Image (tube, helix red, strand yellow):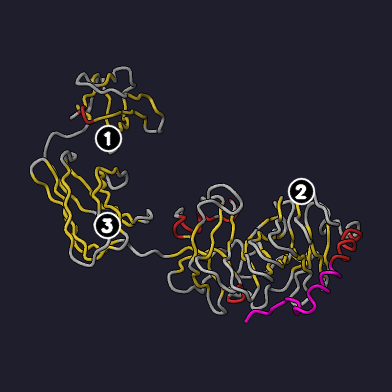
């Protein structure tokens, strides 16, 4: 169980009155504590704002910029915001509370917390919620003690929190940051991130895999949560900045610490069969599923070498099914020679997975440069399917790019004799490369 640090109800307003006096103390202490913060709240002390606060302009007895509070377990310094629907604005890496913030009153509140030059705000609505941000690896749970110039012991109590200990469906846990959030009243919780949070790296650039995770005493478990379309800090949520909120309210004391996790997502379909065969000068693809959940479509991709893939078609899926469903697709203009095919199985939220690769050999006029070697005119087989031809030397320097290919071919008579790399880009997006020797 998390340790609680709230005042008894009967003493709350008395504490606030004392806290109001400490605003002046914090102001006077600023001269001595300038290297630690613009305003300082020592262990066991509290300051209280009874109105909105702006970290750019300061006010209410606090200087603009960082407000430093003691973090040591059992000896917190705390900044309180007391009143309904208060706001804290202007928080940034240059102005925030380095330590614990608590809110009293109704209304959603964005906690302006940070740590050692990094802001890391979170939001909650319930009365009595308190929390702090740690810009530290949960595996050590150690951050700098700006009062002593050394480090705190692992915080909060119960740390460190090994990121290798993960619950069901949790694939990766952030090692950049975490939050200690306390309170017994149920509330939605929102965490925010910026570019330094490395959400793209955490989720392999798939934002739909992002989740809030909580430390339950032995492991990090996924908490049902959803990325906010519009971040609580403004702007659209994306891989570089945004916010994510729990689906249902919960008592913050439920978990010892909170951070970001990346989930292992279920595949949208259960694929039981996938075949590809040549039929004359076409290729017939067929596949079947036995179960589909929230499935949207199958994208058919083709490649000549297994490295460069192009989508050549799309087939809508059934979406929801627990019976055998058969699908087929015909490639009416396959490449001459080897064709590699795969299915991209896409969910409605754009989650996707790939099938195994199938190989089809198709006879016909090759889409290739000829003759080889060549002395003057380089011709392109099936040139009407070719969007662009580029010629590079073996050092990778581009020597020639032709956007419109005709039956007259490409004049290479001015090229120095040697070996060149010719790249063909087809209108369907397929790319193939060929070594061509130029002679005289």
Measuring from the top left, give residue 121's x and y in whole percent. Answer: 65, 58
Would residue 16 be counted in the magenta stretch?
A: yes
Determine the image quadrant of residue 310: top left
Would residue 30 be counted in the magenta stretch?
A: no
**Upstream in sequence: badge 3 or badge 1:** 3
- Badge 2 crowding class, 10 Å Cα cut-off, few under 14, some 14 to 19, many 20 or more, is some
CA distance for labels 1 and 2: 61 Å
Residue 239 visible to an observer of this rendering: no
Measuring from the top left, give residue 239's x and y in whole percent. Answer: 51, 51
Q: Secondary structure at mark 2?
A: loop
CA distance for labels 3 and 2: 53 Å
Residue stretch rendered in magenta on the structure: 1-19
Determine the image quadrant of residue 101: bottom right
Q: Is residue 80 above or below residue 285?
A: below
**Upstream in sequence: badge 1 or badge 2:** 2
- Residue drawn at (72%, 74%) of the image: 153
Mark toward the viewer: 1 or 2? 2
User: Which mark, by number, is residue 434?
Assistant: 1
**In the displayed structure, does residue 136 sit left or right of residue 434?**
right
- Label 3 belongs to which residue? 355
- Badge 1 crowding class, 10 Å Cα cut-off, few under 14, some 14 to 19, many 20 or more, is few
Measuring from the top left, give residue 386's x and y in whole percent. Answer: 25, 30
User: Which mark, by number, is residue 1?
Assistant: none
- Badge 3 crowding class, 10 Å Cα cut-off, few under 14, some 14 to 19, many 20 or more, is few
Quadrant into which the N terminus falls: bottom right
Q: Secondary structure at mark 1?
A: strand
CA distance for labels 3 and 1: 28 Å
- Residue drawn at (35%, 24%) of the image: 400
- Label 2 belongs to which residue? 56
Q: Is residue 294 above or below residue 412?
A: below
Q: Is residue 405 above or below residue 429?
A: above
């Amino acid at each position: 169980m998390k340790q609680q640090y709230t005042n008894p109800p009967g003493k709350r307003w008395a504490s606030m009155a004392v806290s109001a006096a400490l605003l002046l103390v914090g102001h006077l202490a600023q001269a001595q504590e300038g290297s630690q913060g613009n305003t300082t709240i020592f262990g066991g002390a509290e300051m209280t704002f009874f109105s909105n606060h702006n970290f750019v302009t300061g006010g209410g007895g606090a200087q603009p910029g960082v407000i430093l509070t003691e973090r040591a377990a059992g000896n917190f310094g705390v900044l309180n915001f007391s009143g309904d629907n208060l706001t804290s604005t202007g928080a940034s890496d240059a102005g925030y509370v380095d330590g614990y913030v608590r809110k009293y009153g109704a209304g959603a509140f964005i906690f302006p917390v940070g740590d050692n030059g990094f802001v890391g705000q979170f939001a909650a609505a319930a009365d009595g919620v308190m929390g702090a941000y740690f810009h530290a690896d949960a595996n050590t749970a150690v951050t700098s003690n700006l009062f002593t110039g050394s480090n705190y012991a692992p915080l909060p109590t119960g740390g460190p929190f090994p990121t290798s200990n993960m619950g069901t469906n949790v694939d990766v846990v952030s090692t950049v940051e975490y939050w200690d959030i306390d309170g017994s009243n149920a509330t939605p919780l929102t965490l925010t991130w910026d570019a330094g949070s490395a959400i793209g790296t955490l989720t392999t650039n798939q934002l739909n895999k992002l989740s809030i995770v909580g430390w339950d005493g032995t492991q990090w478990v996924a908490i049902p949560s959803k990325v906010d379309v519009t971040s609580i800090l403004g702007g659209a949520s994306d891989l570089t900045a945004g916010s994510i909120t729990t689906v249902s309210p919960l008592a913050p004391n439920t978990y010892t610490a909170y951070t970001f996790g990346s989930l292992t997502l279920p595949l949208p379909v259960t694929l039981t069969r996938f075949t590809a065969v040549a039929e004359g000068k076409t290729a017939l693809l067929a596949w079947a599923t036995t179960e589909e959940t929230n499935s949207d479509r199958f994208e058919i991709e083709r490649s000549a070498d297994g490295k460069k893939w192009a989508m050549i078609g799309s087939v809508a899926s059934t979406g929801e099914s627990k019976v055998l469903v058969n699908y087929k697709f015909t490639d009416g203009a396959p490449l001459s020679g080897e064709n590699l095919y795969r299915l991209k199985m896409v969910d409605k939220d754009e989650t996707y997975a790939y099938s195994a690769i199938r190989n089809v050999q198709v006879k016909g006029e090759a889409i290739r440069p000829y003759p080889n070697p060549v002395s003057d005119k380089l011709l392109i087989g099936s040139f009407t399917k070719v969007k662009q031809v580029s010629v590079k030397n073996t050092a990778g320097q581009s020597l020639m790019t032709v956007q419109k290919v005709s039956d007259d071919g490409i004049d290479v008579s001015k090229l120095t004799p040697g070996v060149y790399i010719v790249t063909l880009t087809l209108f369907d997006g397929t790319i193939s490369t060929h070594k061509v020797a130029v002679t005289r």
